[in-house]
Image (cartoon, helix red, strand yellow):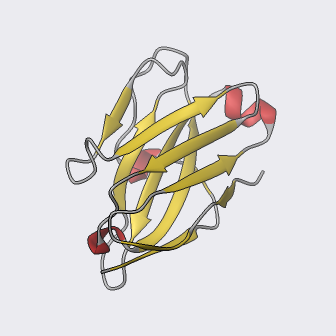
Amino acid sequence: VQLQASGGGTVQAGGSLRLSCAAPGRTFSRSAMGWFRQAPGKEREFVAGVNRSGGDIAYADSVKGRFTISRDNAKNTVYLQMNRLEPEDTAIYYCAAVQTILTVPVRTDREDYKLWGQGTLVTVSS
């Protein structure tokens, strides 16, 4: 089972990017999804997550008001819309999945996620 993340690139501060992460249909429909990032020399950190039903969403404080996570169940894809990017957002971004029951709240702890994508690099220049 593979998660395929895409959409990374280089952008100037203040710009926008949209990351996408596709999963096999059976996995996606049964899973809560999350985005994490890892900057050089730092630990992987939670960025945003959405539960299986789509009714519960959480963000890291550092990205609230700038990033938006969404899931399209018809396309088996989760998105991360990133606006007003800052140099501090530079990192490799990973999508992750964990199978849950429908109403379980969103997961924010990386230890909860069992399936990970390969990562996509986001570079924000000042």
Image quarter for residue 56?
Answer: top left
Q: Quadrant of the C terminus?
A: bottom left
The one of 46 and 101 positioned closer to us in this rendering: 46
Q: Position of residue 105 (x, y in %)?
A: 38, 23
The mark tally for this picture is 0
Taking the spot 20% from the left edge, 47% from the top edge, the residue there is: 61
Q: Position of residue 90 (x, y in %)?
A: 38, 74
- Above or below: residue 67 compared with residue 75: below
Taking the spot 44% from the left edge, 17% from the top edge, the residue there is: 55
Residue at the far left in the pictured view:
61
Q: Position of residue 122 (x, y in %)?
A: 48, 71
- Above or below: residue 28 compared with residue 67: above
The one of 101 and 93 positioned closer to us in this rendering: 93
Q: Position of residue 49 (x, y in %)?
A: 42, 39
Q: Does residue 63 appear to the left or right of 61 in the view shown?
A: right
- Above or below: residue 43 compared with residue 79: below
Residue at the far top in the pictured view:
103
Taking the spot 48% from the left edge, 44% from the top edge, the residue there is: 34
- Above or below: residue 73 compared with residue 93: above
